[in-house]
Image: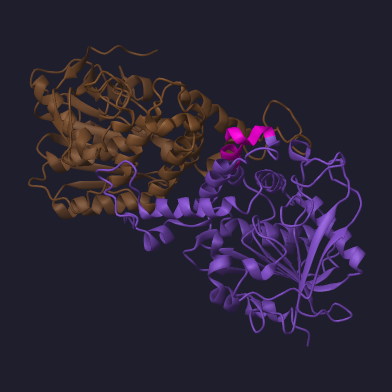
Chain colours: A brown, B purple
Amino acid sequence: MSIAPTFEEDLALGSLTLSNGESLQNVIQRVSIYGTPREDHANLVFVSHGLTASGRLPEWWEGFVGPGLALDTDRLALLGINVLGGCYGSTGPASLSSDGTPYGSRFPVLSIGDMVAAQQAALAKLGIGRMRGVIGGSVGAMLGLQWILREPERFRHGIIIGASDFFSPMAIALNALSRAAIIHDPHFAGGDYYDGPPPNEGVHLARMIAMVTYKSAALFDARFGRRPDRAGADLAQDPRARFDIEGYLEYQGRKFVARMDANTYLTLTRAMDLYDLRAERTAATETSLTFVGIDSDWLFPADEIRQAAERFRLRGFPVRFQTLHSDHGHDAFLTDLPELAALIGPALEGFYVD
Amino acid sequence: MSIAPTFEEDLALGSLTLSNGESLQNVIQRVSIYGTPREDHANLVFVSHGLTASGRLPEWWEGFVGPGLALDTDRLALLGINVLGGCYGSTGPASLSSDGTPYGSRFPVLSIGDMVAAQQAALAKLGIGRMRGVIGGSVGAMLGLQWILREPERFRHGIIIGASDFFSPMAIALNALSRAAIIHDPHFAGGDYYDGPPPNEGVHLARMIAMVTYKSAALFDARFGRRPDRAGADLAQDPRARFDIEGYLEYQGRKFVARMDANTYLTLTRAMDLYDLRAERTAATETSLTFVGIDSDWLFPADEIRQAAERFRLRGFPVRFQTLHSDHGHDAFLTDLPELAALIGPALEGFYVD
């Protein structure tokens, strides 16, 4: 049962100068709000979404966002914004450029900082200044940290789950595999596929690759083991027979094709690759930060997140680091909701107005 | 500088009944020997090759196999056999079936046990019985363990590097990604591509995926970091610019296409998936075994190999487990040769005739 936003609008923000100097025209940001913001926004929390999600928070954080849940829409107002470059309402590579055709291969390289800049413009247009907090997992947490360094006076509390302050070479390599899957698809056509069949096979395979990086060996042991899939073909006889884990990956890939634009996938993963905040300075250090590392996460190892927390402590931020024990890997912030809520309970308390 | 084999022959072995009951006709095994075998074969060591290698041992274990090296062809005779299903001389999916056309999609599912059976037939034809030892890494080590359980009286010493006695669900998942890359390539044509363009893009991508699984995060940090590649394009500006790690993976993929048949890749990786010796019993326990786990290997984690060693100890084999400390991941058995030679020095001594 999904809850409806109390506010949703595609905000037209005009042109945005990107961090690489390029300019993007007619920028749209789709903003969704759940719950009722107080006049002073003291109960407003920005919930920053991950790679393949959107500003429609209950759709991807079901069981965590809603009435009576960890992010309780009866008491908090939750702000979601589809990222720049995305394909869920905000300007992205499938959007129409000034000549009336989709950007495709002409869409510029974006940084995480550019996504935050578009969100800053959206909040300015809405007259939203200081807020209660920010929370995000994975790419959402990357945006959260970028926000905090850029405007440390904006949020009182930040909760950063399953992401560090830079993207590692291994993580770049894993993104490169997913991108190669898309680029190698003949239907990709260099990115200008919008008037032909889309590169569905490539997107399908990209998702299969990514799913492995979001999970863990222990989870695969427990959930799939060495079982054949339910179709029942004999693996020793039939080259088309599959193990259960293979069927799962195929299924995840197939589901994904319907909801992801290939160029968005390329744009967002490249922004992840480019992300490195380690040398960034900040003027103030008002936001208290809770970092969460997941002990089975090999895309963002918990130890890297611990080190990121330390770098924020050295800048002067009040910082807490916590470990979520889970076999679910990187995805634990989407799957282990009661455990996550219990772990970060004290940090979540900071979101609730006294 | 490569050394030449003292013997090389494509042995015609007639038909072979596979473990799944099917029959494969006109089976060829390409056997290569380096160094000079003694009459009693007491200095003969079987060197079992990995997934993409061949019986031409100095080509893939350069610096480890040759005069004066760890596997010293001045004193030992080294036996290499291209595996059944391969594409380097032995019968595989690209071989001609009885109707004069390549097997392609008609090639049967193979097990690691079938590959050993073909090697057993080859040795019988050559009149080779008891030998000094067997050594292999990765898939080569999987064949080694299968050999030892089937004929524990065949070898006096076995050295098993970077492989366990079963293939884990995570490893199956990673193989599934590489296979999907090939199967999704439109040129794959269900496996019957031999009279058209081969699925080069798929094989290229499969290798990129596999390369990541053969390496480690620490190696990528040290060797590539977050450096752009040498082409010098600006990553923040140019969507076609690449990080150095991406250029490396692309290069490895491109190199691989020329030397791998897509169906062989599918056949061998499926045989890996099917591999599980944990329930196999054995009559005798004469071979002394050295297992080597690589501490940065996440395809075959060292701890899984330690557990495999324990299962062989429980069967009654004299067993030693050693850890190779390396940042090179699974590939360390191909890259860290002085360290490997030093670590397994005492075990290698067992290969040398007193």
Give the residue displayed 49% in from the left and 34% down from the top. A185
Q: Residue at x 81, y 70 (%)?
A: B155
Percent across and percent down for residue B119 are 82, 59
Query: Where residue A338 sits in the image (x, y, percent)?
Result: 39, 30
Along the horizontal axis of the image, is B322 left or right of B133?
A: left
> Is residue B30 depicted above or below A42 in this figure?
below
Is B183 within the magenta?
yes
Name the image quarter holding residue A193.
top left
Q: Quadrant of the N terminus of chain A?
A: top left
Q: Is A12 above or below relative to B129?
A: above
Q: Is residue B63 left or right of residue A189?
A: right
Asked if residue B127 is among those painted magenta in the image, a careful observer would answer: no
Q: Is residue A345 visible?
A: no
Examine the residues drawn in magenta and state their main secondary structure.
helix
Magenta-tinted stretch? B178-190
Camera-nearest residue between A323 and B169: B169
Taking the spot 66% from the left edge, 71% from the top edge, the residue there is: B58
Q: Is residue A159 left or right of residue B163?
A: left
Which sits in the foreground, A62 or B79? B79
